[in-house]
Image (cartoon, rainbow, N blue to C red):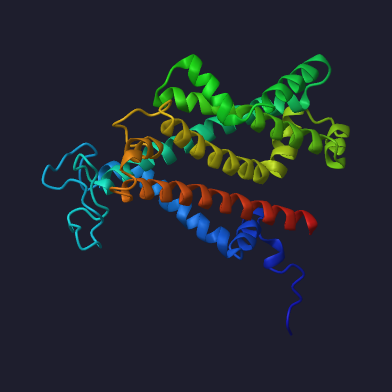
Amino acid sequence: MAKFNLFSEDSNKSPLARLWRKFKNNHPALVGLWVFIAFSLLAATAPFLAPYGVNQQHSDALLLPPSWNEMGDVRFILGTDDLGRDVLSRLMNGATYTFGLSVVAALITTIIGVLVGTFAGISKGIRSSFLNHLLDVTLSIPSLLLAIIIIAILGPGLMNTVWAIILALLPQFIHSIRNLIVDELGKDYVTAYRLDGASKWHILSRGIFPNVYEYIVVIFTMALSTAILDIAALGFLKLGAQPPTTEWGAILAENLGLIYLAPWTVALPGVLLFLAVLSTNLVGDGLRKVLQARKAD
């Protein structure tokens, strides 16, 4: 006689497994995830995989087009610049600066934003009012403009750019986390926790954070795409990474004068920036849709 199975396997998967099952059905988001993983691996391993040094010059190979061009050379797959430097090696190493440092900046912003945003969410009275007004003032300034103001104080440079972007992204991140915490504190399960005598730490760690961590991941992806654009923009404006650093925005600025003579030196870093931002936004949008579908269920 067949046994009656009360709980099916699909209905009892973990929240993370259900999230992944819905996410992988979104094909654009899944493609974006694989591209995102590829950029992450490239940022971590580029110094070891690059065929040439980033500043190694080849005097016999100036402004060579990519190898698929009839004028190209198979030794330089993506061609060379006006100093005979391998474009592929420079772009690979640029992933470490543009994409890798953006991930670091977004992670630091996430950690600080969660801590301060949580404090702002559980605060009341004068502290809450002060934080809200301070966030309102800073949110009225675009992140790139705020980063430029901070760079003007700290001075140009790649590391100063990272700190400027962290400080520029924090207000939006803190505001989003604060709203999440405030919304969760008003729900019935939090009231039940309080009636059971749970402490604030217990409510946060056992009740609120398990229900908002996916939203924090979505906010992280949005902050990451903004960080990528801001690092590249500051490098292009010569306020961030300085030549001969291989940050993609700095490469664009350095080769802008060659746009008609050697368009590949400008087009290729632009394509990589586009793909990096697109993949990050696709992942974030996919996660947002999954969360909305789960909330509707």
For residue 56, which quarter of the picture?
Answer: top left
Count all numbered tags in the image, as a single digit. 0
Q: Position of residue 14 (x, y in %)?
A: 65, 56
Residue extending furthest toward the front? 260
Q: Position of residue 288 (x, y in %)?
A: 67, 51
The foreground one among 276 and 43 is 276
Q: Position of residue 272 (x, y in %)?
A: 41, 49
Give the residue drawn at x 52%, y 28%. 165
The foreground one among 84 and 283 is 84
**Left or right of 251 in this view: 106:** right
The foreground one among 198 and 16 is 16
Give the residue drawn at x 57%, y 44%. 221
Q: Is residue 223 above or below residue 292?
A: above
For residue 203, which quarter of the picture?
Answer: top right
Q: Is residue 7 above or below residue 96?
A: below
Q: Is residue 275 visible?
A: yes
Q: Position of residue 219 (x, y in %)?
A: 63, 41
In which quadrant is the C terminus drawn? bottom right
